[in-house]
Every structure is written in C-alpha cells, then in structure tokens.
Image (cartoon, helix red, strand yellow):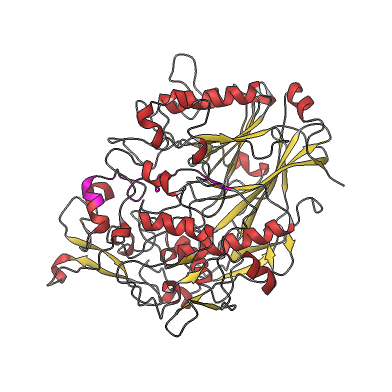
Amino acid sequence: MTNNDPTKFSEVSRRDFMKYSAGTVACMYLTTLNIGCSSDTTQVVQWPISKTVYTTTEQQIFPVPISATAPKLNPKDLPLYTQYNYSSWTRGSGQTHTVWETIATKAPNVAHLLSFFTITDVHITDKESPAQPLYFEWSQSFGSPNINSSAYSPVVLATTHVLDAAVQTINAVHKKTPLDFGIGLGDACNNTQYNELRWYIDVIDGKVITPSSGAHIGANTIDYQKSYQAAGLDKSIPWYQVLGNHDQFWMGSCYESELYQTAHISSAVMTTDSSDSPCESITKPGPYYSGVIDGSDPLGPVIFSGLITDYKIPPTIVADPNRRSLSTLTSSSQNWIREFFNTTSTPVGHGFHLVASNPNINLVPVSERASFACYSFVPKANIPIKVIVLDDTCKGEGQPNYAGAALDQIRLDWLKNELQAGQKDDLLMIIAAHIPFNVYTNLVTDPSQVALNPQRMHLFLPEPFSVVNDYPTSSGTPQSLLDILQGYPNLIMWIAGHRHMNTVTPQIHPTDQTRSFWEVETSSLRDFPQQFRTFRLYRNSNNTVSIIITNVDTAVSEASPATTSRGNAIATARITQNIPFTDATSHSINAELVVQLTPAMQTVIANAGTPIM
C-alpha cells in the first residue's frame, strides 16, 4: 500500500506553519505572538510540532523498557518518573498494515472512495477545578487494586496542548494526502465543564487558549499554564462530533445532581471519604480533601489534599463561573450540544445542525429534540457511503453505571430507521458511537492473536436500563443489538472510542459474510499511546471494499508540554500496571480490513471512486 497510503510527510516549513495557524496577526513570530502589538500587550506562545510527521507505518513511539527490579513508584512520586525512566520513550521502525481476511478475501485496490480521521477521549481537563476527584489516585500506591488513572494522572496538565499537537499533525497528513472529514468520538471534556468544552472547540478553531482557571496561577512562568495560539484545524476539513459519557456526567460516572453542580463553581475544595464509589464518596463530609493541581509547580503536584484534620483552615481556591457544569437536572446534553454552534470551523454545529432536519426526527418527542445527539450525513455526494452518528450513552437519573452504554427505545427505533433508509438507498454505512460493544477484551493487533484472546467484553447495561443487549441472543431472550445490526448487510463498520485502546473486532455473521462488519476502536489522546487514527476506504478489483486503518502519533516537539505529557502517560501506564516494566510495544494497530458486499452493492460501487493510477 505504499502508493496509496503515504506514511512519511515532508517537513512543515515556517510558511506552512503560518498558513495553518489561524488568527495570526502581523506582529506574530515563530515562538510567540503579541496580542495588540503595543507596549502593554501580552505575549502568547506557540507550540509547533516536530518538522517531520510520520504515521506509525513509517515510525512508531515505543516505551523504553525498565528493569523488573526498578523501584515501584506511586502516582505522587512525580520527581522520580524521569530518574527511573518511567516516562522514557523512543522512536523506532514502523508497523505494516496486516491484512484481515476474516470477512472477505482481499483483491488489489483499484479506486479510492473516502478518507477521514478520528480523534477520541481527549478529556480536556480543568486541572484547577475543585470538583476533580484527584485524591482517589494521588493517594494510591503502585499497582493498588483501587488505582484509577481517570481520577488523576499528570497528563491532565497539558490536555489542550496534546490536542493542539494532534491538530497540527492532522494538518500535515491532510496536506500530503487529503482527508474528506474528521470526527471526534466523544469525551471531549473530562468533567462536563463549560470551560473544558470551550477549550476543545477553540483549539480546533485555532484561537488563543488560556489553559488555566480561577487565579490562573503560574500563567506567566509555567509552560503548561501559559496562554498560547492554537494552530487550528485546516479549514478545508469539516469535522463532526459524537457525545461521550464524560461530556455529560461528573467524571463520566455520576449524574450531575445539585451537589455536583455546586462543587464545580465553588471556592471550597471538594471533600471525600475516598471510598471505592466516587459517586457516593463526594456526598460525605470527609475525612479527606480531594485537592487541586498546583499550577505554580512545573511538575503539577496535587495540593490541598489529604486529611481534613491536617488543615487548621479549610483550603479554598478562586472560584470561576466558567467551570460551571454543562449538565442540568433536566438535560445532560442540551447545553453541551449548543456550544458546537459557537465555532469558526465547519460545519457550524459539527453535525448537531443535522439533528432537526433528519427524516427520523419525528420518532423523537418534541420535548427531547434539543437534547438528542444522533444524526447522519453523506460525506461525499458521489460516493455511496453514509455515516450514522449514534449516542449510545446513558440517559436520566438512576442508572447503575454511567460509564456503560445504553439505548432506549427512541434511539433504537431511530437507528433502525437510519439503517433501513441506508439499505434502501444503496448506501454503505458506518456507525460512529462513543462506546463499543461485544469487542475483544484485550489488544488484538492481527488475526493470529484472536485464538489467544477470544473473550468479548460486554459494555451495554442490562435491562431495563438498555432495551438491547450487545451480544448474540437466542429466541425468547431480550433483543440483541448485534442481531439487529447484522440484519443490514450494507453496514460495514462500527467505530468507537471510550476504552482508550486500539482494538479491531470482526463482528462475524455465522452464515452470511455480507452481514458481517468490522468494529474499530481508536485510542485516547489523553492516555498512552496518545494517538489518532486515519481511515482510507478503497474499492477492490473484485468489488470488495478495503478499510485501511492507520494510527498516527502526535508529532510533538521537544519544547512542548505535549512532549512531557507523552512521558507522563507512559509513566502512568506503568504505575497502574496497564503496561509492564518490560513492555516496549507501540500499542498500535495498522490493518487492511476487507468487507464483503452484497451483489446489489457490488453493482452500485462498480465504477465508484477515484481510480488509482
């Protein structure tokens, strides 16, 4: 696939960088820019990426293995991460595309159909918010069964910087081999806060970012706290968005009650009993303070945490109304959706502008339409491929696990109608959702590993919280989402995030190859391996379709906080034992996934696409 999927991209010159940096002014120079160009103006830094951009087929990022006898560090041992190589990484050789013929037999690619990128689980974090449950992780020891990096990890220092680096990397990929669109697969926010979502949209829009809140401690001296000019996504790339659980629930786990909503905008540091259940813990008066990040320290340690009795005066911080929760007692998604209409990139609304005009909106009660986060679009008018964006998160109070997936009857009926319409209109279909289903539990990078990893992870809630299960069922049992999806042969792929890992799962129909489809997960930009993914679809000479998936590491530069974040992500993976000390693998998956089409669809696409010369 050397000719069709270029992996090494030429250096991004200063002229190119300026071209892709939105909102520049005449007084800008490469590392800083002056807002206002007067004696009292504020200098705003920029964080360019490295000059050469690679996909993981050309070059990969590998953790540097450390000795099995190395000291076992705790999350709070920040000064020791570097000393003991916990955060060390290196560059190495690329990974070729493994051909998966589990569903269909490959033939030569003859025409290009569609190209797009996915980013997911960015978890833009207001690290100074008093509503963060930092003590849950900060207080743990190495390998503790209660360890939970989603509560705290030093990657929270630079989440906007990592996104900015990813956007610049996407621009470089697009310059070499154009992308038709991009899509964020959910969890743009970490804690459903207004300022977190604004940072996410504003980074992609290419605005000046002030990545701190409250007192803005360290804003003039600490690299990750300084205001900076985001580059912005190339304006020729439309981007769309999916709703995730962290976008609407406290830490993605708890319904936003009045207690949580107050905690976001309070000056009081949150108290906790640090029990195994965060949702119950923060309703207790102590005995611990949860803490906030110290933005005046280059390492970003947690302060104002620990036993309440250790503090003669309760710790307080500067409150900030921009920390307010986007979720309300009546809708967890309406305010979040509304912010995507406040943007300078396209399309305005980033997909949610299509909700009201969708032919199946009549299935949604009028009172719920402003909160409805499902829509569909056809990226290229001359290519018969439709993308169905599905909100598969929990809704309403009283759910047992807000990190689980669920579909109520309204969304299931909407999905069925979308699939039926795509089938009737002879469109191949891709479902984009936040939470995957019925997927391999572990990282499976090629077909040879399937026999060793047969387990499937079920992520949908049981009845009555979800009207469908996510695994095959027999007659007389609750309906299965997999059975429903395999009733539409034109469905070729389900894409998702949520698990922060790269895994490919073939959803194989037992008797009909045309009813099988691929499920592809993209890893998080927050946690190791901090990658996004490109998808390039081709028509093959036998009228099968190949989906070529490629991971891309952000092309960080040495000076950027995004570089430090990569090291922190690797260190955290070691401390939580998500990767062992000796792990030196990239956790990437590059593959060519072959899809079998029905005879009718083979006829439809027989002349589709741009011929490969």
Q: Is residue 51 above or below residue 189?
A: below
- Farthest residue in the right direction? 613
Say above or below: 270 vs 249.
below
Magenta span of residues: 239-261
The residue at the point 74 percent across, 67 percent down is 10
Nearest the eye: 46 or 445: 46
Instruction: Judge whether residue 333 can be spotted in this image.
Output: no
Q: Main secondary structure of the magenta part?
A: loop
Who's the residue at 33% across and 60% down the image?
137
Q: State which quadrant residue 225 falls in.
A: bottom left
Hey, which quadrant is residue 318 in on the image?
bottom left
Residue located 50% across and 61% down the image: 203
> In the drawing, does residue 413 fall left or right of residue 453?
left
Confirm whether the magenta stretch covers residue 254: yes
| Nearer the observer, 338 or 500 | 338
Eyeballing the image, is 227 above or below 328?
below
User: Can the viewer see residue 505?
Assistant: yes
